Structure formats: structure tokens, C-alpha cells
Amino acid sequence: MSNLKNTLREKIEAWRPRTKMLLEEYGNTVIDKVTIGQAIGGMRGIKCLVTDISYLDPNEGIRYRGYTLPEVFKLLPKPKNAEMPYVEGLFYLLLTGEIPNEQEVLDLVDEFSKRRILPRYVYEVIDAWPCCSPPMAMFSSAILAMSRESFFAKKYKAGINKNEYWDPMYEDGLNMLAKLPEIATYIYAKLYREGKRIVGNPNLDVGANFAHMMGKAKPYDDVTRMHFIIHADHESGNVSAHTAHLVGSSLSDVYLATSAMINGLAGPLHGLANQEVLRWLQEVMERMGGEIPTEEELRQFVWDTLHSGQIVPGFGHAVLRKTDPRYMVQREFSLKYLADDPIFKYVDMLYRIVPQVLIEQNKAKNPWPNVDAQSGVIQWHYGVTEYDFYTVLFGIGRSIGIVANLIWDRALLYPLERPKSLTTDMLEEIAGIKEKNLTHELGDD
Ligand code: HAX
């Protein structure tokens, strides 16, 4: 058994009594009240999910296992000549809560490398898609197809003890994560490089191998590491993480749950926002004939977008109430490497202008930029200009947190997720307005 799996087994055994005690002795303790506004309004702020992988503070932003992003980037081991840490090290941290040492990360690099080869039929599933299909749909279908490889499904059929569920989930999770860069780069080659694929190099870590398969030189390996690390997790309530948790709660395997989460990530209010930012920027650039607009011209463009009933992609958040630290990590990188790129100049201007406009409009609860306002521009700078592909990159990163969560969901035996719904009549009764409405309808006031 690998060191990581041994460490994880010890952690799980130590953790289980905590969950058991909370359930058995404090199961009736009230956490929060639920309002009608929350029930109709997308369940904002209802505290009814549990995860120890990450926590999102509205003002501070994300912490992975208690560490802020700057701490994660500082503490995790880095490859030689790299500015960004190993992606594999982040997976170790999310899974165990511990910062791995160099050797523990190298062992994991080796594990990922051994598990990365794709079954032949996965290429065939991707090839079966007609030309110009959406990359996220192709990505989701390739992951879904691999459900036939699931150890968990096989073990379940054979009658596994529920205390051991997490073990085949771990195997499935690592197998799948190791293969995602191969799938993504194959889709990229098929859609945008006439099928000319660069075969992976088993001697490289995930970040460097992804850059290699995309045909990109340094520092794209660091761009990849940074991108996958900042997108890995954002606690459990966002659409992608929540979808994976919900689907996994019916004991669906890792492939089924991750394919579903990719479908949720592909919506423009969630992960697709990163490519929407680029599409929207192209519109501004076209309108300006390639010239950098003045601040006044850009402000007018933002207002025109809002007045036409559209959203400004890359700004706002359902939980955050300050600038997203994931945005700041990328901004710092961009100020260092992209400062003279005209497209970064646009983004820099938007950073100053959009919040002012959204504050003036007085609708968005959070006018500040989120992770998606900056990520696409970095890809564009390094020659990945096919912005339809950007959410696939987000999907690889997010899968790292999804797998860590799914393994722990099974380890702690979290049950089937099944909240309760009410009808509008019932809400009106609770609000005490049902009688009033009826009288009004009868014209009897
Ligand atoms: N542009 C225009 N209007 C916005 C806005 C934006 N960027 N952000 C919020 N608003 C509007 C909402 O549409 C809503 O309007 P209505 O009352 O007319 O429905 C109002 O302000 C209140 O919304 P909110 O409570 O502040 O925000 P929500 O929790 O409802 O939604 C969203 C959060 C992220 C979906 C929202 O801010 C948005 O649409 N942003 C743009 C898309 C985007 O960048 N998405 C990515 C978010 C991060 C992420 O998940 N990455 O994957």
C-alpha cells in the first residue's frame, strides 16, 4: 500500500469518532434558521454541508485545510527551477491535511505517472463527437465513459463492507485524476491542432507534463500548476462541488460524480465565466478597433452591457464579499509576466472600473473580481487563444478537490443527500398571507 494511502487510513480512523459523536450526541443541536428568501433564492448562506477540505470566508477567501493561498504557495514543495508548487503536493494536502515533504510528493508524482495511460475507447468516445462540439461536453463524456473502470462499482457489487468504501474510491480517484490532463490535451489537439497530439512524458510532474502536451515552453508549466492549484476547491456549496457531492451521495462512482460536476461547471454563471470574460473582451476590442480604450469608453461599455440586461462576467460572487484571493494570485503573476500585454491592460482597467460601476448600479452584493476575471487572459498570453477550452482547464483543477471530498464523504459514511421541498401554498401559509390572498381573489375585502 502506498504511503499516502497508509497515512490516509490513519487519518480516517482517527477522524471517524468525531463525526460519530456529533451525530449521536449533538444531532439535534440547531446550526441556523432557514428563511423563505433562502428557500426560493438558491439556498444562499444555508449552513447544511460539511467538508474539512476547504473553507470559504466571505471576506478572506478560500483556505485549503486551514492554509490561505499565499501559505499554500509558500509551503508546498516545488520542482527545481519552478516558482509554483507541485500539483500533486496540493492533492496530498487536501487529502491528509498535512504539508507533504519532498519525498512524499515525488512518490505521488510517480503514482500519477503510472496511472495516466488512457484506455483506447476513451479516445474513440472523444473522436465520435462531431466537429466543433463544446469541449466541456466532450470532457464530461470521456470521464463518464471510464465508469466501466470503477473499482468501487465492482467492489460494491461483490459486497464490500461500508467501512472500506473509501479505499476503492481512493483508487478510482487517483486513476481518474492522473488521466484528466491526457483527456484534456487530446480534446485540445482534436479541436484546434488538426488532431496533432503530443504524447505525454512519464518523467514529468502533472504541471510540466500538461505544458509539454499542450506544446508550451516555460513558464507555462508554472502557469498550469498555479491554475490547477487555485481552482482545486472552494468549499462544498458551489455548483460543481455540490453536484459531485450530491451525485456521489447515492454511491455513484468517482467517474459518474465527476462527469456530473463538469456539467455544472460548464454554466456561464460558474466556470464558463472564465471564457465569457474573453468573449466579452473581444467585443470591446472589436468596438475599439484594437486600440486601448480610455477609462471613460470602457466604463460606457460596462454600462452598455448592464443596460442590455447582461451580466459582467468575472465579477461578483455568491459568498465572497471582497476581491477573490485567487484573482490576486493571478494578478501578481500577470503584473510580473504580462504587464505589457495589451489584453492585460484591458483587464487591469476593468479591475479599477467594473467595481465602481457595479457599486453605482447597486444590485450586485459583491462588486469585486472573482477568479474568472483573470485566468483566461493568462492563457491567451501564452498562446492558448481558443477560449472555449478554458473551462476544461478549470475542470481539471476542480477535480482535485472533488476527489479529495468524495474519498472523505465515503470515509465518514455521509448519507444520501435528500433535502425537503415545500410548495408555494405552504410558504404562503408559513408567511401568514394565504388567507389574505384568498380573500383578495374573492373580492371580499
Ligand atoms: N454583473 C451584473 N449583474 C450582477 C453581477 C455581475 N457581475 N453580479 C451580480 N449581479 C446581479 C445579479 O444578477 C442579481 O440581479 P437580479 O436581482 O436582477 O437577479 C443581483 O446582482 C444580486 O445578485 P448577487 O446576490 O450579488 O449574486 P448571486 O449570488 O445571485 O450570483 C454570481 C453570484 C457569481 C452568479 C453573479 O455575481 C454573477 O452572475 N457574476 C458574473 C458571472 C461570474 O463571474 N461567475 C463566476 C463566479 C465565480 C465562480 O463560480 N467561478 O467559477
Image (spheres, helix red, strand yellow):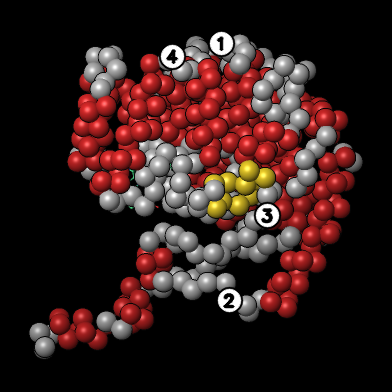
Residue at screen point 51% across, 34% down: 328
- Residue 53, percent from left and from top: 67, 50
Residue carrying label 1? 196
Amino acid at the residue labelled 1: Lys
Given contact means CB atoms under 8 Å apart, are the residues at marks 2 and 4 in contact? no
Given contact means CB atoms under 8 Å apart, are the residues at marks 3 and 4 in contact? no
- Label for residue 30? 2
N-terminal label among 3 and 4 = 3
* Mark 2, secondary structure of its residue: loop
Label 2: how many Cα within 10 Å (few below 14, some 14–19, many 20+): few
Q: Is residue 111 above or below residue 234?
A: above
Amino acid at the residue labelled 2: Val
Residue at screen point 56% across, 41% down: 259
Residue 135 in sight:
no
Given contact means CB atoms under 8 Å apart, are the residues at marks 2 and 3 in contact? no
Q: CA distance from mark 2 to mark 4?
A: 54 Å
N-terminal label among 1 and 3 = 3
Residue carrying label 3? 52
* Mark 3, secondary structure of its residue: loop
| Relative horizontal placement of residue 168, taking residue 380 as reference (left or right) | right
Instruction: Quadrant for the C terminus, please.
Output: bottom left
Q: How many marks?
A: 4
Residue at screen point 11% across, 89% down: 444
Label 1: how many Cα within 10 Å (few below 14, some 14–19, many 20+): few
Q: Is residue 214 above or below residue 396?
A: above
Label 4: how many Cα within 10 Å (few below 14, some 14–19, many 20+): few
- Label for residue 340? 4
Amino acid at the residue labelled 3: Asp
